[in-house]
């Protein structure tokens, strides 16, 4: 089992100091960093990160339409995405299971997603793995349904990327318990796990925060029960959306508080996956 970490300046410095060890950087990690000001600067950032640690490429950028959208195939630039994969030298790619129009039916969401997934798998057969992640947010209600997610993953015979905080948020939105929601996800097909903590305030949830102690037991249960190959620490906030006082990170400045939190979380996750 491999360990990955969001690319953060804090994590890079910890590696250089010999204070942590992990296998991959995951990138993109912060949607608001300056790597996205132009394609050329983004590709240069990929080269930089790849030279520090092997890189896991995550998401659709430089494309903009996600996997559940009915127009995904028409809007997805295969060659530009291949160039990103080539430069990053990523062993696999991962996509969020969202993007459907708000008024689409459950059957339409499933059908469009499966068709688009097969399109991706056909065009990126050289990838070691292609995974699809449960999403969160104010999306089409069916995209948050664990049974719909399972149907998409199983119909397309795909690997699953289980995001813990997304599952929690979706369970809250659907008024289900976290345990029941997770039990309906396609964990028998899980390849990678994204783990981070969250804070709740005024009915809102903010993720990519420090992992709560109770979540380590959940992760240990998941990796000991299901076929997980990669555990990724998806920590790091570039802005405090709900005003909870969390440490903020940026691409060009070290936050000492965040750095300590990265170190602690990497060490605890390493202990779990190396048992």
Image (tube, rainbow, N blue to C red):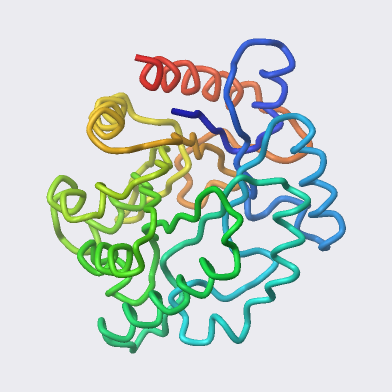
Q: Quarter of the image holding residue 55?
A: top right
Q: In which quarter of the image is the C terminus?
A: top left
Q: Does residue 186 appear to the left or right of 58 in the view shown?
A: left
The answer to whether residue 189 is above or below residue 114 is above
Q: Which residue is drawn at 59% across and 63% down?
A: 124
Q: Name the one closer to the observer, 245 or 255.
A: 255
Q: Kindly identify the residue that appears in the image at 68 percent across and 35 percent down.
A: 54
Left or right of 102, for residue 245 = right
Residue at the spot 34% in from the left edge and 62% down from the top edge: 157
Q: Compared with residue 271, is residue 128 higher up or lower down, i.e. above or below? A: below
User: Which of these two is toward me, 236 or 231?
Assistant: 231
Q: Which of 29 and 270 is in front in this view?
A: 270
Relative horizontal placement of residue 255, taking residue 143 as reference (left or right): right
Residue 30 position within the rendered picture, expressed as x and y whole percent measured from the top left: 63, 48
x then y, percent, for residue 167 = 30, 52
Task: Say which residue appears at 39% left-offset and 31% top-offset.
Answer: 211
Q: Answer left or right for 180 relative to 27.
A: left
């Amino acid at each position: 089992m491999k360990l990955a970490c969001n690319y953060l300046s804090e994590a890079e410095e910890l590696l250089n100091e010999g204070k942590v060890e992990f296998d991959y950087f995951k990138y993109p990690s912060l949607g608001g960093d300056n790597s996205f000001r132009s394609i050329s600067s983004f590709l240069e950032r990929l080269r930089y990160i790849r030279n520090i640690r092997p890189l896991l490429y995550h998401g659709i950028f430089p494309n903009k339409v996600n996997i559940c959208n009915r127009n995904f195939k028409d809007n997805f630039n295969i060659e530009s995405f291949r160039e990103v994969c080539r430069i990053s030298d990523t062993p696999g790619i991962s996509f969020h299971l969202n993007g459907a129009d708000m008024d689409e039916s459950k059957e339409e969401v499933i059908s469009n997603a499966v068709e688009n997934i097969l399109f991706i798998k056909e065009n990126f057969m050289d990838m070691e793995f292609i995974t699809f992640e449960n999403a969160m947010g104010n999306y089409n209600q069916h995209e948050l349904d664990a049974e719909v997610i399972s149907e998409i993953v199983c119909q397309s015979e795909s690997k699953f990327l289980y995001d813990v905080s997304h599952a929690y948020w979706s369970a809250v939105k659907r008024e289900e318990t976290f345990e029941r929601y997770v039990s309906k996800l396609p964990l028998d097909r899980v390849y990678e796990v994204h783990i981070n903590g969250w804070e709740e305030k005024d009915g809102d949830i903010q993720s990519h925060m420090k992992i709560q102690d109770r979540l380590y037991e959940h992760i240990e249960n998941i990796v000991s029960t299901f076929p997980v190959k990669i555990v990724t620490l998806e920590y790091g906030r570039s802005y405090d959306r709900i005003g909870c006082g969390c440490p903020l990170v940026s691409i060009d400045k070290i936050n000492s508080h965040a750095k300590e939190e990265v170190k602690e979380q990497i060490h605890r996750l390493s202990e779990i996956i190396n048992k």
